[in-house]
Image (cartoon, rainbow, N blue to C red):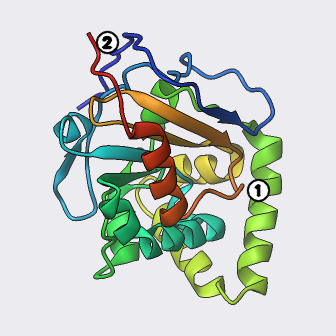
Amino acid sequence: MLPDLNEGQNVKGSNSIEIMTAPVTPQVERPGVGEMAPRFSLPSLNGAMVDLASYRGRSNVVVWFSRGFTCPFCRVYTDGVRAGYDALRAADTEVIQVAPNLLESARRYFGESILPFPFVCDPDKRLYAVYGLGDLRALEATRTAVVSFAHAFTHGDSVNQIRGAWFDVMNRNFLRRLHHHAMTAQEQGIFVIDKEGVIRHLTVVGPIDPVPGGGELADLARTHCGASPVPA
């Protein structure tokens, strides 16, 4: 199911925006704080469809647009979210991790080590574009790749780095996946969405910049989604 782009209604709410990357020109204007979050429905690692609208009225949601399992930094950040997942659930908040990987490759990579929160894949990065996250292009992609591989090989993570790259590139989509890894550097984004589907906080950072752990995300949800007005 393609993302629903007809969710541009503004509602009142406190502003909470952090932008930490160099300016880029996104394909679609980034939805802002106080706006309804664009809806989407994507299959997850465990096979179930993840529908953002299904959380309405019952849970806050943190949508984290990451670089996925091929990035050594994102693997660490994923572990941080997993470690603080109980705090997130105590804050009545779910996390949806979006990754630009192939779903089949992600399932092979994670195997039986399924995450406690939904992990969905957007290999064509259409949902990234819907949420206004830009591509920093080839020069940044080269820098990111060099830093990522150096980090993996100097921090004892070389097996996961090679394994992840192999699963995501060496398949029938070889040329497309090679282009993704060699020529694109997608921004990461964290969108904190309240129970009414309204964006209450957003942070945009570079491809390998740090993102909050589970405990910090829980604090963000409590701070920004505590008493949210219902959209008209």
Q: Secondary structure at mark 2?
A: loop
The residue that label 1 is drawn on is 144
**Whole-percent x and y of residue 147?**
80, 65
Vertical placement of 32 versus 20: above or below? above
For the residue marked with disc 1, what is the amino acid?
A: Thr
Residue found at x 37% / y 21% = 36
The residue depicted at 53 percent of the width and 22 percent of the height is 32
User: Which part of the image, by quadrant, shows the C terminus?
Assistant: top left
The amino acid pointed to by label 2 is Asn
Coordinates of residue 131 in the picture (x, y in percent): 49, 28
Residue shown at 53% from the left, 71% from the top: 80
Toward which corner of the image does residue 205 lie, by quadrant? Answer: top right
Q: Could you say where residue 178 lies in the image, as x and y percent from the top left?
A: 60, 53
Determine whether the residue tagged by mark 1 lies in a helix, strand or loop.
Answer: helix
Residue 170 visible in this rendered orientation of the protein: no
For label 1, the crowd category at 10 Å Cα-Cα, with few meaning under 14, some 14 to 19 and many 20 or more, is many
The structure residue drawn at horizontal position 50% and vertical position 74%, both measured from the top left corner, is 79
- As drawn, the label of residue 48 is none
Nearer to me, 131 or 161: 131
| Quadrant showing the N terminus | top left
Check whether the beta carbons of the residues at disc 1 and disc 2 lie within 8 A of each other. Answer: no
Does residue 21 appear in this view?
Answer: yes
Q: Earlier in the sequence, mark 1 or mark 2?
A: 2
The residues tagged by marks 1 and 2 sit, at their Cα atoms, a distance apart of 34 Å
137 vs 107, left or right, is: right
Q: Quadrant of residue 146?
A: bottom right
Residue at the spot of label 2: 6
Nearest to the observer: residue 49 or residue 106 = 49
